[in-house]
């Protein structure tokens, strides 16, 4: 039986709509929670205004950018691609907006709910994360499927839909690169004057940059991470569908439809995973519509036994296992459902194994990341030990750990590629089938994104909740609970970064394969005249991009330092707590300088592929993409893990080891952590965007490249 | 006219022998200089004994390694290759031994000669460097040409001679990786106890590790750098000759012979460059044999006007320009002579342009390196400025500078490859001709190695001379002169590193092309099933290798710290200057731990290509080499330049900027410098070896790889 592509696409559309339904319901649920006392509400209000100021400023710039690029695309390619581009940008920006909207409202509610109990706090924060996760998945699915149906499901028009991915990538560029610069500039700027010059604690409301810092947490880890994974999710599905059209002419429909079908059942699995953490609210259990029918009663009873039980004495390990169980639960379910999808589609059984490979790879990378960055393990403990001989050895050991931590992710990705290609090749006997399988592995890895992203986007909400609890001097046991929730967020943040990089590489690879197909490149001989220069320049791009983004943080932080100093100098009684700081000014300056500083690196990511493609030809461009992917993967993992390990080595010392806070070892650890900040929160994650954006630009413009002006 | 290959080879052999003649003459000249007072001689003696202890220990290990590998080669390949391997190892080890022998004798003589005048000091130190430079070139040429002639100049037997390159690579592995660990471990170990714990100055004879530290300077920058460039020089000629055999069957003889011919005229040019610095000794001028004939009188008069004039008031700039003029003089001469070589060989004029491209690229990379690491330029000054806000910003800015500094070298190498391939392709119309041209550009870049290596190997001699002058309390004006000579060495060391990396990349690329030809790979499709995993694993190798070597420095330094502490504790009167430290024990421990720590990373470089080649097949192995080359190039440049820039930022502050020595800015700069030490002296340079060694192993075993056990 071969399923019609449009059937699969319509199922995906329906699941997307179901996801939106969940988002609306969950939004109401989260917003129904109480917001605590006046102080809490005042602080939350300031963060909300800051976030809103940042978003409205950023989205204005994005609107101009999107309009210009859409015009260029219409001019040089087709109006259809331009339309898809605009829709993609709107879909991703919409998901980001919604995620931010709820995150800066859920933070204060989490703090308030933590007064009731630990699980209640987790429910609110995780619910907020789930809204981000499901918005990303649903908006992406609805956008892609509607466009696909608008083009009558014609495989030849699939190339237009690549514009949707380009639109999503553009938003990711702003959210991840601009957001990454914003978040670290605000963080460093706040600390440099507050902690270092004025000697006031972190999260002190007297610090004019404290709100910008809190906004930054959301900008980086909610909007930034969301847009990054929106791009991966979209890119992997588009690449798989594009490649699917070329695997076999007989069953092209099934191959094109499968990634949509897998994504569709992924929505169900993600919802189940989310349910496992949130459960049902006690007051609505009896009126639950599901309990009105005998069969559904059984189903609900069956499901209910998997809901996490979090009591008041829950340790970090218990909380972590609740989140892990939810991801695992979703994974088990997606395996069952995607087996049905594969059987119904009528494609070879091997493609189900490919989905399995993708899922395992994603989880394996996340675990490898955790090993290298957790302070219960050797690598981070070695950094902590190195702090005893000063900051220099701390940095050297951290760099060594970061470099060493690249080995496992590379081997995992390499093995997944090899296995996927092998399985695809065995199934249909062509190289294209192998490449399709690689793309499908990427779809598999990202199929449970609704819940995995929820665990990421949960983090900054818990972090903010902790800050609000601190600033409003809530009772000790409440702060103890928000601290527990915050620690959980820090752990998931590190593994989330590993997952984001791994999925970016698989997506970039799938897009590269789609580019080669779309550009009609017959032979990609590595020793061809322009390939090696292409590879070398490509390998250089991540270094250039990282250098620029790291320096951008320094410049933007400097502007904030000047403003914070000015306010302490000019506003009477600010230090004494009688004068009110001008939070908005700091948010405004962070926003402006972050947007200004991202222009040059951002343009490079778009322009360099176009220049290389036109000057050196389409083969050299493929080389460029491979070079960027390989070198960017390594550099991103190194930076993210070194940064995470330094961070946790510091936290380990703060538990009282090697003299604890204030000791020389701690000072050295702070140096490591400060170096690691732009590594893990700006330059490292920005590389995810670089490798995908360069690939999608190449794919969108694939048909415009020839043998190159400089060819011979 | 097409020259017989054997004619070119014999010319190269004769020039090699002439080079040996120069080495012997120069050795006598340098050793004739006075050795100063008793204290100086005692210190020099200790360094000599330390160096000798290190070398004899290292060479014993090498002998075992060489015997085992030679046996393996005989078993799995041919006895001829094994023979070449042994000869290559002996030639490189011999050159290294000679260079070290004279360096640890020239140091004290330089200090003594500096009492006479600045130029006299320069003459001795540079003469010692010239011995290393010319030994490398001559031993390599004599070894290769004799083996080539032994195989009757049969192009089909060229593959055996690749064993010579493998032998040279093995020595480079020990000298550069083992030596790199040794030199930094001794440096860090000496500083940690001496400067930090005991508060005694650097180069204080009471410190038991001071001699190990002085030996280390020679081990790293004389033996290490020499073996590294011996490998590049040898590898580029072998690769060019191997590829030359396949360009065109008509004139294969000319293509094979040309690299030898270029190398041969390079010897003459290098000698001229060396003459430009050293000139003639005043007391022997009249008895000079050259002045006995009318024509030679004219020639000598003509040449004499180019000899550098160094008076007592010479600034660093004057000294630098004297060395630069010598390299430029040699470059101009090689261009003239290689034009004749190209015309005589009967190959297309384009190949002369290719040599020009190589020469320009080498110099351009050296200048780009200087820009990024010199404290008269913006990048290093930006690091110096960042020291004002502490060690963290110093590290971040240094990393950013290091990353930024990769852009120019990559563009230079990419442009050279493109131009060379284009020129070769235009000349003979095949891809192989293009690849041959790339290899020839590498030969061109390295043709003046005799003099460029002299400027590198000069550095540690001047450095040691400074240390000896310090320790023996020589008069202020003498120390002023040795300081000037030392500063000059620091500047040339940074550019030398850039040159070493650039030449390593071109050599690795040429070896890769030779490998592809030798393994009879028809099509290197990047999207083939095993290529991408190969590229990714390859890109990971430099990270793993760097992590291992960085951690090795820490471990080895720790052992030295324990020993130095023990001596201060157990030897009575050591601190008061009445007890004698046991220098040998420190040298022994550094040697043992360096050799122990290099085993694992060193084995990886040899074993991984063999595993990948056999498991994933010969195409995947090509991917591995490309990945390692691209990623290793970037990482090596980043580490070397960040390290150099941190070093010079510290030196800039020590001139009195930002509070000078002892200020907080200086403390931050010291952290940067300490992090930079293993970057620039251990892990960075070790990557040169990694990329070449993996390529030559693949080339030597090329015929043994098939489609791989895991292929399908």
Image (tube, coloured by chain):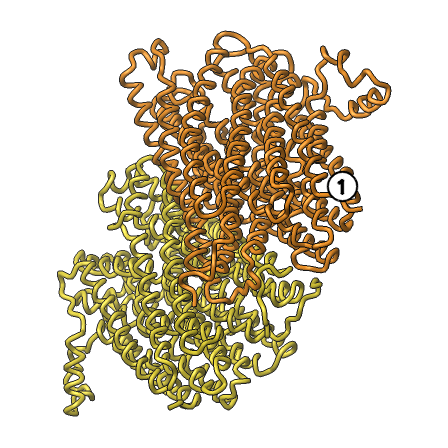
Chain colours: A yellow, B orange
Residue A562: x percent and y percent?
Answer: 48, 49
Q: Is residue A234 visible?
A: no
Dividing the picture into quadrants, the one containing residue B478 is top right
Q: Nearer the viewer, residue B221 or A65?
A: B221
Q: Disc count in the image?
A: 1
Secondary structure state at the residue bearing disc 1 = helix
Looking at the picture, tell me which residue is in the foreground, B712 or B322. Answer: B712
Q: Hey, which residue is sitting farthest top in the picture?
A: B38
Horizontal side of residue B11 vs A551, given as left or right? right
Q: Is residue A347 left or right of residue A297?
A: right
Question: Which residue does the image show at 57% across and 33% down from the upper left?
Answer: B493
Q: Chain of mark 1?
A: B
**Image x and y of residue A252, in percent:** 47, 85
For the point 31% across and 52% down, the residue is A373
Mark 1: few/some/many CA within 10 Å (<14, 14-19, 20+) = many
Q: Residue at x 38, y 53 (%)?
A: A407
Q: In the picture, residue B587 is in which quadrant?
A: top left
Q: Quadrant of the C terminus of chain B?
A: bottom left
Across and down, in percent, residue B163 comes to 53, 42
Q: With respect to residue A529, does B73 lie above or below?
A: above
Q: Which residue position holds label 1? A: B341
B520 vs B486: above or below: below
Residue B413 drawn at (x, y percent): 62, 50
Is A178 displayed left or right of A711 in the figure? left
In the depicted structure, whether residue B23 falls above or below residue B368: above
* Residue in view at x 18 percent, y 77 percent: A281
Residue A360 appearing in the image: yes
């Amino acid at each position: 039986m071969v399923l019609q592509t449009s059937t699969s696409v319509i199922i995906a559309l329906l699941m997307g709509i179901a996801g939106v339904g969940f988002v609306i319901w969950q939004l109401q649920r989260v917003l129904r929670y109480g917001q605590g006392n006046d102080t809490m509400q005042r602080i939350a209000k300031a963060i909300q205004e800051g976030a809103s100021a940042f978003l409205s400023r950023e989205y204005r710039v994005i609107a101009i950018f999107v309009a210009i690029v859409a015009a260029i695309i219409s001019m040089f390619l087709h109006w259809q691609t331009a339309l898809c581009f605009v829709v993609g940008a709107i879909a991703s920006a919409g998901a980001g907006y919604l995620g931010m909207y709820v995150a800066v409202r859920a933070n204060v509610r989490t703090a308030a709910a933590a007064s009731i109990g630990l699980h209640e706090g987790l429910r609110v924060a995780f619910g907020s994360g789930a809204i981000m996760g499901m918005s990303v998945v649903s908006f992406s699915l609805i956008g892609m499927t509607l466009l696909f149906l608008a083009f009558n499901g014609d495989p030849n028009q699939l190339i237009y839909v690549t514009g949707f991915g380009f639109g999503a990538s553009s938003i990711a560029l702003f959210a991840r690169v601009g957001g990454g610069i914003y978040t670290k500039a605000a963080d460093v700027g706040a600390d440099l004057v507050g902690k270092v010059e004025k000697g006031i604690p972190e999260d002190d409301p007297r610090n004019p940059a404290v709100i910008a810092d809190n906004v930054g947490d959301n900008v980086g880890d909610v909007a930034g991470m969301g847009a990054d994974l929106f791009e991966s999710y979209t890119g992997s599905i588009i690449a798989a569908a594009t490649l699917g059209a070329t695997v076999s002419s007989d069953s092209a429909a099934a191959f094109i439809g499968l990634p949509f079908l897998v994504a569709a059942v992924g929505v169900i699995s993600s919802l189940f995973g989310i349910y496992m953490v949130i459960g049902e609210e006690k007051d609505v259990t009896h009126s639950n519509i599901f309990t009105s029918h005998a069969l559904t009663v059984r189903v609900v009873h069956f499901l209910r036994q998997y809901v996490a039980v979090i009591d008041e004495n829950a340790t970090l390990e218990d909380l972590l296992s609740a989140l892990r169980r939810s991801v695992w639960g979703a994974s088990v379910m997606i395996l069952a459902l995607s087996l049905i999808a594969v059987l119904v589609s009528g494609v070879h059984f091997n493609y189900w194994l490919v989905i399995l490979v993708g899922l395992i790879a994603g989880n394996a990378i996340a675990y490898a990341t955790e090993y290298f960055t957790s302070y219960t393990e050797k690598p981070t403990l070695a950094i902590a030990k190195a702090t005893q001989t000063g900051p220099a050895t701390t940095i050297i050991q951290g760099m060594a750990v970061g470099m060493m931590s690249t080995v496992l992710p590379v081997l995992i990705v390499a093995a997944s590629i090899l296995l996927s290609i092998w399985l695809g090749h065995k199934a249909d006997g062509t190289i294209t089938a192998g490449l399709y399988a690689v793309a499908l592995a990427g779809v598999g890895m990202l199929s449970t994104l609704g819940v995995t992203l929820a665990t990421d986007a949960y983090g900054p909400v818990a972090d903010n909740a902790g800050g609000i609890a601190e600033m409003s001097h809530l009772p000790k046991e409440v702060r103890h609970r928000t601290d527990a929730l915050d620690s959980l967020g820090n752990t998931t943040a590190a593994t989330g970064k590993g997952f984001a990089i791994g999925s970016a590489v698989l997506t970039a690879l799938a897009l590269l394969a789609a580019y080669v197909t779309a550009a009609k490149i017959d032979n990609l001989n590595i020793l061809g005249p322009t390939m090696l220069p292409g590879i070398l320049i490509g390998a250089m791009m991540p270094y250039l991009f990282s250098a620029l983004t790291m320096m951008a943080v320094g410049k933007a932080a400097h502007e904030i330092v000047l403003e914070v100093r000015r306010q302490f100098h000019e506003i009477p009684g600010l230090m004494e707590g009688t004068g009110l700081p001008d939070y908005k000014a700091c948010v405004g300056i962070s926003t402006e300088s972050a947007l200004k500083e991202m222009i040059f690196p951002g343009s490079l990511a778009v322009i360099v592929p176009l220049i290389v493609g036109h000057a050196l030809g389409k083969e050299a461009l493929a080389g460029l993409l491979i070079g960027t992917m390989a070198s960017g993967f390594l550099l991103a993992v190194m930076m993210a893990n070194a940064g995470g390990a330094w961070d946790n080595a510091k936290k380990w010392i703060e538990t009282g080891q090697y003299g604890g806070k204030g000791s020389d070892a701690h000072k050295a650890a702070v140096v490591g952590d400060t170096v690691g900040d732009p590594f893990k929160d700006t330059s490292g994650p920005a590389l995810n965007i670089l490798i995908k954006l360069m690939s999608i630009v190449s794919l969108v413009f694939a048909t415009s490249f020839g043998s190159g002006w400089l060819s011979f």
